[in-house]
Image: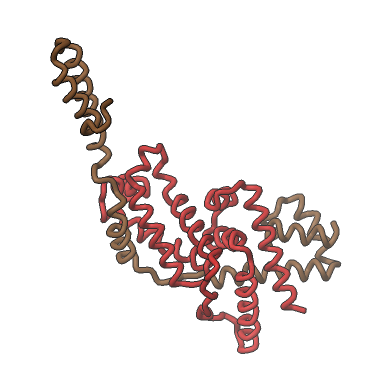
Chain colours: A red, B brown
Amino acid sequence: MVGDTDDALVLQVARGDRLAFARLVERHGARLTALAVRIVGNRAVAEEIVQETFTRAWVAAPNWQHKGETARAFAAWLSRVATNLAIDQVRKPRNLPIEDAPEPVDPATDAVDALIAGEKLARLRVALAGLPPRQRAAIALTYDQGLSNIEGAAALETSVGAFELLLVRARRALRVAMTEDEA
Amino acid sequence: MTDEEFISLLDEWGGDPARWPVHLRLDAMPLLEHSARARAGLKAMQDVERLLARSAPAPAFDSAAIAARATRHGQAGRPIMSPALRKVSFAALGALALAAGILVGMTPPGDTAIIGSVQMALNGGGNDVQ
């Protein structure tokens, strides 16, 4: 349905349509929250970041057409704003600790498998928390958001080559952490 | 292919060899048969990616509250006039300036009071006319 596309809704938001804005928030909010949670490691802070992202979207909407930006880029714009806000948050000196998120239900068939899987997951969380914020963002954009390297680079406002380098370094750190787990 | 080269491919392309470029995959696969280090590296990367998928955050999200707060907090930052109204305003301002210019051109040299008042109006009050 044409009227329900991001493009169409963004045009309505630019005219001050709150219902259209609410639909965009509903469409993109959970995705952005997941992205922010992965980068900052704290749900409350992530929700603040998403709130700020959408507040900026509401304020900026009337200017998109004047700047010649295409409404099609709305999702990418949101990802870029949320990612930058999350990275800024992580870089602040006073930073909330990575919270203990509830363990997901483990599909392992017995208790020993579940214990090992839980331990590996804990290792991964520690390794993720130890990554520089831009590397963590690259992991979140690639594995959680499913973005291509081109899209991820745009979200991080960097070149594709630089984004790929962030991914390589992040993968290496996580792989080494899991390899040490085996040792 | 050496173990180090294989590990570099893991870091560059991830733990699913099916996503690697074909020529790299063909070079790498034989190494897995006789290198324990390559197998351990592959398993570690696959563990990372499997756990990343399992631990992807899926937070509850109150979209209505977020939207309401965004429009409320953002209201002060939004322009008062719509883009269409702004276009009309600029057009009106242009017409006013044109009319003032014509008025100035048609006014006899002695009627400086009218010219001054028009200039003051266009300059926003006349504090800085001279």
Instruction: Examine the rendering and report whether any part of residue A2 can be seen.
Output: no
Q: Residue A96's spot in the image, x, y percent? A: 51, 73
- What residue is rendered at 29% in x and 57% in y? B71
Point out the image quarter for the C terminus of chain A.
bottom right
Q: Is residue B16 above or below residue A162?
A: below
- What residue is rendered at 42% in x and 67% in y? A47
Q: Quadrant location of residue B88?
A: top left
Q: Is residue A175 left or right of residue A19?
A: right
- What residue is rendered at 20% in x and 12% in y? B105
Q: Residue A5's spot in the image, x, y percent? A: 36, 49
Depth check: give the residue in front, B114 or B37. Answer: B114
Q: Is residue A31 left or right of residue B72?
A: right
Q: Is residue B108 above or below residue A1?
A: above
Depth check: give the residue in front, A23 or B68. Answer: B68
Q: Is residue A69 above or below residue A163?
A: above
Q: Residue A126's spot in the image, x, y percent? A: 62, 75
Give the residue at the far bottom of this rendering.
Answer: A111
Depth check: give the residue in front, B118 or A115. Answer: B118
Instruction: Examine the rendering and report whether any part of residue A99 can be seen.
Output: yes
- What residue is rendered at 53% in x and 61% in y? A87
Q: Is residue B41 above or below residue B80?
A: below
Q: Residue B9's spot in the image, x, y percent? A: 75, 57
Q: Is residue B112 left or right of residue A126?
A: left
